[in-house]
Amino acid sequence: MCLLTLLVRLNTNDPATKLAAAQSEITLEAQLEAQLEAQLEALQCHFTWDLDPGRKKLLSIIDRLQDIGTEEGNFWLGQVYNLQGYIHFLLGSADEAKSFFSRAAEAFRRMREPDEGPWLLVNYGNQAWLHHRQGEEAESRACLSKVEALMEEYPSPSEDELHPEVYAEKAWTLMNFGRKKQRLAADYYQRAMRMQPDVVEWQTSYVLGLTSLFKHSDTGLEGDDWEKMRQAKEQDPENLFLAAKYLQQLAKKGESVKDEARELATRVLRNPVGSYSGIKPLLMVYRFYVSTDEGVYNLQGYIHFLLGSADEAKSFFSRAAEAFRRMREPDEGPWLLVNYGNQAWLHHRQGEEAESRACLSKVEALMEEYPSPSEDELHPEVYAEKAWTLRNFGRKKQRLAADYYQRAMRMQPDVMEWQTSYVLGLTSLFKHSDTGLEGDDWEKMRQAKEQDPENLYLAARYLQQLAKKGESVKDEARELATRVLRNPVGSYSGIKPLIRVYSFYVSTDEGVKLAAEALEKHPDDRYLKRCAALGYKWRITSSTDSRPEQSMIQRAILLHEEVISLYPHSSFVKRMDLASVYAKSNQGLAESDQIYRELLARDLEPAETQVLFNNYAKYLNYERWDWQRAALKILEKIRDKKRDRMCREIDECLARLEEPQCFKQQWI
């Protein structure tokens, strides 16, 4: 009992004494409270590390932490639970926080010997803060006493620095809070390792942090950083996440990693799945360095919406968001702006206003967290996706796409994939040029090929450009073919431009052989069948090669018919190709005539009509030797559509001709 309290009891009738005693007690309590606050502020724990990025970011981190494997043997399990507990506290759930802090302490005790050690400093600090915030001062002081006891028993090897265990947990924690915090995390890992250099897990986490810091580098880690990663992989050979990240770095340096990636995949798939199981970085290795066959879900979703299928659109937008999360770090970022915008529009059109506003809120949060580097322009990620999308909508849009790619690259110049897509867009813009890309455009393509050596589609397009400049590319084409045939088939695998190179600059016979060999490896792939059909058509319609055997023509006919059935919505050109092949067959021209009659009867778009008239005129001129019929038929078609401003003059011209309808009778 304190002296003031005793005086109050001895002189309970003295108001002045009572007041003085009460004031003194309040002062003493305030002093004790201030002392406790000072002790808490001096702790090294999540509550003192400035870790409150906002509710949305916290929820995102919680999602990521839940994906981390919690099986026994996870070195960082205690740290995972500590961070989960702190985030639950920030989100308003003190009971959940207390539960996770208890699980963290238990995880540390199971993983370490002895049960008590400096690895519990952060955890006891967290518990001290939580009890204090709950008004449980006795429990808070008990935790503070545990911290003091541990610091006395396990002092830091360096008096002016934190304990290495604290540095390591602080570094691991900061790695979850964005790029700025990651730079500080790297420094803390280095401090921990200087004082305690034999902890393999710290070295591994340090180099993994470096890969995140320099993930946009075209060449990967270099110098001492690369040597540290190589050493970490040797010291931690069972860490499959590290192994996958290591393959990424090797691939960035231009080394082939296909065999290693496939071998690693068998190991990864045998283990439980988690965010550190290696599956995500391995998928990225496959995406960029093994197979470039990817789903373009955002665009597919929008097209399904335009075609009236809202459910299909919703499905593809969801798949797009999931694909972005699998391929990017962190899970949420500006690459989702377009996707969330699409979902907002779709929900609005479906009358789902609450869901639409939720998506709009996500857009606003992303724009606030990831503002564009230039205030008067879109975010570079948006420019890049807009550019990629416009490339699919014809020549006029492609010019605009090139401008958007340039804007994106000016603001974020180290994204290799944007540079590659930009130069591929240039080749499409100038595909009818006899000499190929020139000047700065050609230099950009050369640089893109150096920076993206594993992109076989780009390599094939590069050979096309070289061949247009008069250079011999036969040896390079044959070498590239061996690489292309080893990989999965897709529209960006390189097979189509390579067949074109073979057909026009090596030999059409070799082009057919390449297509046939690819089909043997992938007999059920519809895209490959489309490419092969093109190779066969070029060989059969070539005016410089010998007349093909009927067996080849028959094979080409069957292949074209199958492709038309596989691509029912985009078979317009393939039907004309089939007519060209039929014209060279022993079946004569009857089948070709029938195909053109069917196409001429269709109500086509103006651009398609122009292509059809052009091909039909060539067919009649070169196969039928009847240019007059071709001219008259085209004039009648233009007149009947009544869209051309010269329809009246055309009608008068046809009326002056003798029996112009005789041709129509023959055609029909």
Image (spheres, rainbow, N blue to C red):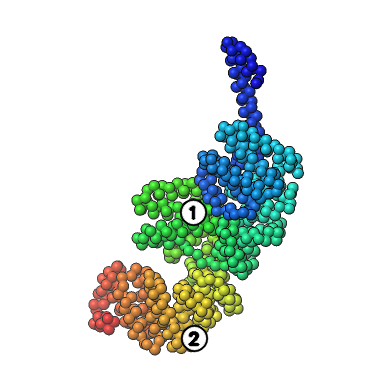
Q: Residue 111: give its label.
A: none
Relative height, residue 657 to residue 413 (above, below): below
The spot of residue 246 in percent (x, y) is 64, 61
The x, y position of residue 142, in whole percent, is 64, 35
Tag 2: residue type?
Answer: Asp
* 659 lies above or below 239: below
Which residue is pictured at 38% across the width and 72% down the height?
Answer: 568
* Helix, strand or loop under label 1: helix
Vertical side of 516 occupied by 148: above or below: above
Residue nearest the viewer, comparing 25 with 160: 25
Q: Do the residues labelled 1 and 2 touch (CB within 8 Å)?
A: no
Q: Nearer the viewer, mark 1 or mark 2?
A: 1
Which quadrant, please, contains the N terminus? top right
What is the number of callouts on the image? 2
Near mark 1 (Cα within 10 A), the count class, few <14, some 14-19 or many ≥20, is many
The residue identified by callout 1 is: 336
Circle 2 packing at 10 Å, graded few (<14), some (14-19), many (20+), is few
Q: In the image, 589: left or right of 170?
A: left
In percent of width and height, residue 43 lies at: 65, 38
Residue situated in front as seen by the camera: 545 or 304: 304
Amino acid at the residue labelled 1: Leu
**Residue 545 numbered mark, or none:** 2
When the figure is inspected, residue 370 is found, relative to residue 448, above or below; the finding is above
Question: Is 623 left, or right, of 402 in this rendering?
Answer: left
Identified at 39% across, 89% down, the residue is 586
